Every structure is written in C-alpha cells, then in structure tokens.
Image: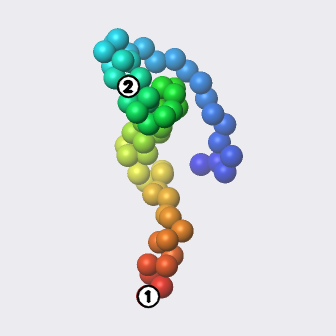
Amino acid sequence: MPDNPVSKKFSVNVPDEIADDLQRWADAEGRNRANLCAFLLELAVRQRYPEMYPPKGFEGDKEKGAG
C-alpha cells in the first residue's frame, strides 16, 4: 500500500430510499454524503481484506502496554 495514495472518483447508483437515508445520516454527522459514502466504502474494504489493511493504532495504545 503506497504511503501517499491517490483518491479515485467514480459514480455509484443506489435506490432513492438508500440515497435519502445516506443523506440523513450524513446530515446527522455534519458531513456531506460523498464523504460519508467514501468512509463507508473504505470501512467495508478494510473489513473484507484485513490482511491488507491492518488496524491503525492510537497514540494511547503505546501507554497501555507500558504498565
């Protein structure tokens, strides 16, 4: 996986009801629908291929093991 990945753009067609629910979800989180969809797609791919996308640690994780 490259250090500086390039974002790719493409279109996705979803039923009206799904688009409406995605918009409602995005509004509730204060983001736009495209950003929410990009996040959800990335999350799905990371879950499908965990060996390619290991979980990213948090800074606090270092402290937990230092006890």
Q: Earlier in the sequence, mark 2 or mark 1?
A: 2
Give the number of the disc on residue 50: none
Residue 29 rendering spot, x and y as whole percentages: 44, 36
- The foreground one among 53 and 26 is 26
Q: Position of residue 14 (x, y in %)?
A: 38, 16
Which residue is at 35% across, 11% downward? 16
Q: Is residue 11 left or right of residue 16?
A: right
- The amino acid type, in three-letter code, at marker 2 is Arg
Q: Position of residue 62 (x, y in %)?
A: 51, 76
The residue identified by callout 2 is: 24
Q: Quadrant of residue 25?
A: top left
Spatial distance from mark 2 to mark 1, Cα to Cα?
A: 43 Å
Q: Amino acid at mark 1?
A: Gly
Q: Residues within 10 Å of mark 2 (few under 14, many from 20)?
A: some
27 left or right of 7 in image: left
Residue on which disc 1 sits? 67
Which quadrant would the C terminus be assigned to in this image?
A: bottom left
Q: Residue at x 44, y 81 (%)?
A: 65
Please say if 4 is above or below 61: above
Assess whether mark 1 and mark 2 are in contact (beta carbons under 8 angstroms). Answer: no
Q: Secondary structure at mark 2?
A: helix
Whether residue 38 appears in this view of the structure is no
